[in-house]
């Protein structure tokens, strides 16, 4: 099967599910300490300047980013999730747009271009490059891009059906509750895992694998710190900082990333093109 087709087709099904709508409408804060730390690193320099938020889902990041600037634009290509965001924030510029083609947005304009919550992992690797090129184009010289991405060297990469088994506890009520929860989720999760495991692939620097979210309903790219740095630099960015999701601490080498299921990247578009 054509990988480009399958990644988008599978993930769009998950984004359009009732479960995704419920989950994305519920979450209202930072997803992890690394996301908060990364945003705090760039918030002041972006104060009152144009911000672009890609893959807004139901709008979790809108109030968080708007603490820094009311000059805010959000986009998403999943109409159903975008509608939730528009209902919550009817007066904002929220566009139905695919990040691979943001030709409706001006070049060299945004002080910050963000793609949060590992959204960039949901397209195939060639399309990830298209998205990063578009992020580069719309960001003003001297501005920053910020996104997160699943870490192939992190423990999350090992997620499998066995993660759903109830954790042991001496409290029989709690164990019963965990078992019931497992019995409710296991059929759909097992079905999805088996369906998506056919597409698992390993490449130099990245892999394609199903992730536990939405009952193993998504098929995503996991990359490494070294490969993501290389890719950003090859596109003309200067990588400025990387934060681990779990403790929000900066990471400097692959050796330090094993605790982080995903990483937050901040990269700058130089004032002048790098020669
Ligand atoms: C994991 S969800 C995160 C939603 C939201 N940012 C949050 O943190 O709650 C990823 C979002 O990215 C969107 N997305 C993925 N690929 C996209 C693309 N190529 N163009 C626009 N949006 C995309 C999906 O529709 C989905 O809403």
Image: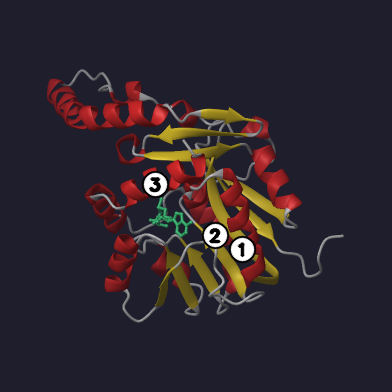
Gap between marks 1 and 2 measured at Cα: 7 Å
Residue 157 at what x, y percent from top left?
Answer: 49, 30
With respect to residue 56, does 151 lie above or below?
above
Q: Mark 2: is the Cβ under 8 angstroms from ligand 1?
A: yes
Percent position (x, y) of residue 8? 43, 48
Label 2 SS: loop
Q: Nearer the viewer, residue 38 or 15?
A: 15
Q: Quadrant of residue 28?
A: bottom left
Query: Which residue is drawn at the image coordinates 36% and 64% (left, top)?
Result: 59
Q: Quadrant of ligand 1?
A: bottom left
Q: Is residue 123 left or right of residue 166?
A: right
Position of residue 120 relative to residue 152, above or below, is: below
Would you say the residues marked 3 and 1 are in contact, meaning their CB atoms lie under 8 Å apart? no
In the visual, does 225 lie left or right of 22?
right
- The residue tagged 1 is 134
Measure the C-alpha gap from mark 3 to mark 2. Answer: 15 Å
Residue 267 is labelled as none
In the picture of the structure, the residue carrying the numbered disc 3 is: 9
Residue at image point 39% right, 78% down:
92
Which mark's residue is nearer the viewer, 3 or 1?
Answer: 3
Q: Nearer the viewer, residue 250 or 3?
A: 3
The image's mark for residue 100 is: 2
Rate crowding at label 3 as few (under 14), some (14 to 19) or many (20 or more) other CA atoms within 10 Å: some
Residue 146: image quadrant is bottom right
Q: Secondary structure at mark 1?
A: helix
Callout 1–callout 2 Cβ contact below 8 Å: yes
Horizontal and vertical percent position of residue 44: 59, 70
């Amino acid at each position: 099967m054509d990988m480009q087709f399958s990644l988008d087709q599978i993930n769009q099904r998950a984004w359009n599910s009732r479960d995704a709508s419920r989950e994305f409408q519920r979450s209202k804060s930072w997803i992890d300490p690394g996301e908060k730390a990364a945003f705090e690193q760039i918030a002041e320099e972006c104060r009152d300047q144009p911000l672009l938020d890609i893959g807004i889902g139901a709008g979790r990041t809108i109030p968080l980013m708007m603490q820094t600037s009311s000059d805010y634009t959000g986009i998403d290509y999943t109409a159903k999730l975008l509608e939730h965001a528009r209902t919550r924030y009817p007066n904002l510029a929220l566009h139905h747009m695919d990040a691979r083609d943001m030709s409706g947005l001006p070049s060299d304009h945004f002080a910050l271009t963000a793609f949060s919550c590992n959204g960039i992992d949901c397209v195939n690797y060639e399309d990830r490059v298209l998205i990063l090129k578009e992020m580069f184009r719309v960001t003003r010289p001297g501005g920053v891009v910020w996104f997160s991405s699943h870490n192939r060297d992190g423990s999350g990469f090992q997620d499998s059906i066995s993660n759903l088994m109830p954790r042991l506890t001496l409290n029989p009520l709690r164990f019963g509750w965990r078992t019931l929860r497992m019995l409710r989720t296991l059929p759909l999760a097992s079905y999805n895992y088996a369906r998506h495991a056919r597409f698992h692939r390993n490449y130099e620097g990245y892999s394609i694998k199903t992730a536990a979210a939405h009952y193993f309903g998504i098929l995503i790219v996991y990359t490494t710190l070294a490969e993501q740095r290389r890719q950003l630099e090859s596109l003309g960015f200067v990588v400025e900082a990387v934060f681990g999701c779990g403790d929000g601490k900066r990471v400097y080498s692959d050796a330090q990333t094993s605790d982080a299921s995903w990483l937050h990247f901040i990269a700058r578009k130089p004032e002048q093109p790098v020669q």
